[in-house]
Amino acid sequence: MTGFGYGNLLDLLGCFVTLSLLSVGGAITTVPEMHRYLVAQNPWLTDSQFSASIALAQAAPGPNVMFVAVLGWNVGMASGGGPDNGPLPWALASAAMAVSMLGIIIPSTTLTFFAARWGHRNRERAEVRAFKQSMAPVVIALLVATGWLLTASHGNVQQAPLLWVLTVVSAMLVWKTRIHLLWLIGAGALAGVLGLV
């Protein structure tokens, strides 16, 4: 892992500002690009730290975008040498978390506000309706890419096909039946505890 310092905060901000403007369907759809930037291009996090950050934030109550704060926090904390290394890691973690969240939230929120107002005023126009309908496949493709990345970093290549089958079966159950999503999440957690996945 390469070092992250206060000089890297502007780079981190630039990355998350760019991703914010590309986050059609939510910040989670930009996870593959975050992985490329934080793990491959600038090895500030390992694969397991990256996946654990997302899993922890998604398991906690609150907005979906909180995983960005956890990623920023872990980048700063890991680069500062951990929590037992004095005040530097805490300051780096706080700064990286704040920069990450501001970068991911402010541009997309501003763009969404003005685009939604314009779209509402022009909702009867054919191009506005076409744009809205064309965004669904884009969001689905981005979510599949995110799932692919998180499955690939799972570590056990033999289980990857099983995980994809379970994902497809779960999606079909949610779509075609009245089974509540929480039951499927609970079943997945139980399968994980039992070591089945």
Image (cartoon, rainbow, N blue to C red):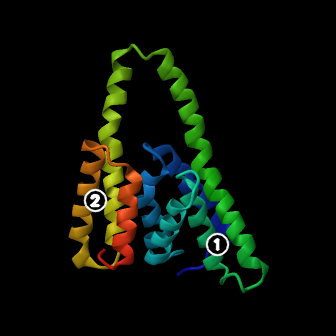
The residue carrying mark 1 is 76
Q: Is residue 6 visible?
A: no
Quarter holding residue 196: bottom left
Residue located at (75% from left, 78% from top)? 88
Residue located at (73% from left, 74% from top)? 90
The count of marks equals: 2
Please, what is the three-letter code of the amino acid marked with disc 1? Answer: Gly
Report crowding for label 2: few under 14, some 14 to 19, many 20 or more residues within 10 A (C-alpha).
Answer: some
Residue nearest the observer in this picture, 39 or 101: 101
Quarter holding residue 138: top left
Please provide percent x and percent y for residue 100: 61, 58
Q: Is residue 15 visible?
A: yes
Residue located at (67% from left, 79% from top)? 80
Please provide percent x and percent y for residue 144: 31, 54
Please provide percent x and percent y for residue 45: 51, 75
Quarter holding residue 12: bottom right
| 168 sits to left or right of 195 | left
Please provide percent x and percent y for residue 176: 24, 43
Position of 143 relative to 92 (above/below):
above
Secondary structure at badge 2 equals helix
The residue carrying mark 2 is 167
Circle nearer the N terminus (1, 2): 1
| 58 sits to left or right of 131 | right
Please, what is the three-letter code of the amino acid marked with disc 2? Answer: Thr
**Residue that protrudes farthest toward the top in the picture:** 124
Secondary structure at badge 1 equals helix
Residue nearest the observer in this picture, 35 or 48: 48
The C terminus, quarter of image = bottom left
